Image (cartoon, rainbow, N blue to C red):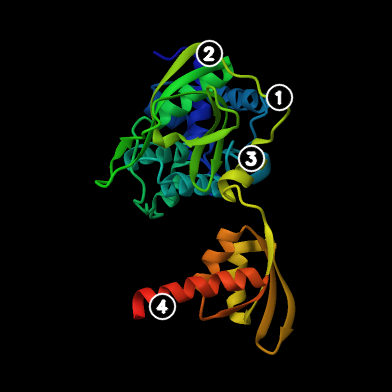
Amino acid sequence: MITQKATILCVYEILKTYTDENHILPAEKIREKLKLIYDVDMERRAVYRNIEALRSMGIEIEGYRENREGYYLAEREFELPEIRLLCDAVAGSDMIKEETGKTMIKKLIGTQSIFQGRMLQKTVFVKSGKKTWNKQLFYNIDALNVAINQGCKVKAKLMEFSFDHGLKERTDSPAVFSPYGTIWAEGNYYILAKREEAEGLEHFRIDLIKDIEPLERGVDMIFGSFNPGEYARRYILEHGEHREVYTISCREELWQKLEEAFGADAEVMKKEGTEISVKISAVPSAVRSWVLEHLDECDILSPKKFREEIQTVVQKAWQKYWR
């Protein structure tokens, strides 16, 4: 039996579930749903009082004065486009198992009205299926965050991919390390840490860790400050390489692909007819990969040593495939 004090929550749940700007409920319909769903008999005046009480708590509810039709929840913690984006992110993450993802998406959709939820459910989510699922992922994230907050070291098994698409333990496992922070980069979760007796910081993919065991030993102190975001850019996104400046020429149609690959790090320096000269500031491996992918569509202008490096790669490929 729902107590009198709890009925205000029933009114809120009805507004959250059954109303939005396109679906408005008059007081009488709210009373009907209270009876049907919660077996609560509520007078019309009590409906008005509860709605005013919800408004006094900062909940934005539109009513008769605004639309002359009835009531609807005008503001939610997440707007519909935000929920769509979050659902896409959950569904598209290879780190989240399909069944777990469905449960998370259902919770996200539950923040909207049932009518908006139906719109979201029509979206088709497709996973790439590239990554091997580690069922300990969510436990790992929680255990590492607890260790970080408590300032203690952990012992864990470090894993790598096996030929049968599973996971096997690395030769340098298990490891004892001090965890300092979690990082999300390139679709993966990493733990920023320092192994016991080691000098520098390292990062480990959290989905490639198993059997985390908190230890009763405090983390090693780090002298000087470090920026996790800067660390991720330098050592995860750029693989510890130093940026260099490159100049290439290509047809202007290729600019779209350059923009997608390098963004603001690519700049058109000159345009002659349908040809453009582009300056790129990036790490060598990123430019090398892009140039080799579009080898017949671009020409390297500088630096000379990079052009010679690509020539060597092409020569070796020719010797391997056409000798």
- Residue 197, can we see it? yes
Residue indicated by mark 2: 5
Q: Quadrant of residue 47?
A: top right
**SS for callout 3:** helix
User: Hey, what amino acid is under mark 2?
Assistant: Lys
Which-is-in-front pick, marks 3 and 2? 3
Eye-nearest disc, 1 or 4: 4
**In the figure, residue 306 lies in which quadrant?**
bottom right
The CA distance from mark 3 to mark 4 is 39 Å
- Please tell me the numbered disc located at residue 223: 1
The mark lying in front, picked from 2 and 1, is 1
- Distance between mark 2 and mark 1 Cα atoms: 55 Å
Dots 4, 2 in contact, CB < 8 A:
no
Give the x, y percent position of residue 140: 43, 27
- Report the Cα–Cα distance between label 3 and label 2: 52 Å
Q: Residue at position x 42%, y 41% from top? A: 105
The vertical placement of 234 against 57, above or below, is below
Mark sitting on residue 231:
3
Q: Amino acid at mark 3?
A: Tyr
Q: Secondary structure at mark 1?
A: loop
Q: Earlier in the sequence, mark 3 or mark 4?
A: 3
Asked if the residue under mark 4 is in contact with the one under mark 3, i.e. CB atoms within 8 Å, the reply is no
User: Mark 4 highlights which residue?
Assistant: 318
Q: Residues within 10 Å of mark 1 (few under 14, many from 20)?
A: few
Of 81 and 225, the residue lying toward us:
225
Percent coordinates x, y for residue 50 in the rendering = 59, 23
